[in-house]
Image (tube, rainbow, N blue to C red):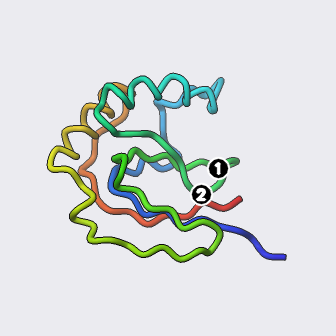
Amino acid sequence: MGISTNGILFYGICFGNDAAFIPSDDPWGWKEQFSEWETEAGGAFLSYHCHEDHPMWYAAIKGAEITAYRGDERKVPDLATLVPEDASERLRAFCEKIGAEFKEPAWYLVAFMS
């Protein structure tokens, strides 16, 4: 039996494991807190890749994320059609809400291992 991974392609910002905005006393309590901010930020959201024991955090634009689960293939559409014109502004607003450093967004291909 091998290791299963998901491939994740997204437009956004990678924070890595240096995410000071995630409460260290409750690293998984962020979901409730950030869900209301996601709505306020107009479609940006927070997630992670790598592994649950070693999360690598990222912010992305809803609709500009494609996941290939457990080796399934996914056809990738024209990426330019997935990114709204105001994506940078949305991500900047989201970063301000959560207290994260804003970086210029880009397309990232990452993996999640379970």
Please provide percent x and percent y for residue 74.
48, 73
**Nearer to the camera, 101 or 84:** 84
Question: Do callouts 1 and 2 mark residues in contact (Cβ within 8 Å)?
Answer: yes
Q: Which mark is residue 102?
A: none
Residue located 24% across and 38% down the image: 90
For label 1, the residue is 54
- Residue 92 lies in quadrant: top left
Q: Which residue is at a point 59% across and 48% down the rendered structure image?
A: 55
Q: Residue sitting at 40 percent across and 51 percent down? A: 14
Q: Which quadrant, please, contains the N terminus? A: bottom right
Tell me where residue 35 appears, x and y as whole percent.
47, 28
Q: Quadrant of residue 83?
A: bottom left
x then y, percent, for residue 99: 37, 27
Compared to residue 48, the image places residue 94 above or below, namely above
The secondary structure type at the circle numbered 1 is strand
Side of 50 where 36 appears, left or right: left
> What amino acid is at disc 1?
His
- The relative height of residue 100 versus residue 5 in the rendered view (above or below) is above
Question: Residue reaching furthest right?
Answer: 1
Q: Amino acid at mark 2?
A: Cys
Question: Tag 2's secondary structure?
Answer: strand
Q: Nearer the viewer, residue 66 or 110?
A: 66
| Marks 1 and 2, how far apart at CA | 7 Å
Q: Residues within 10 Å of mark 2 (few under 14, many from 20)?
A: some
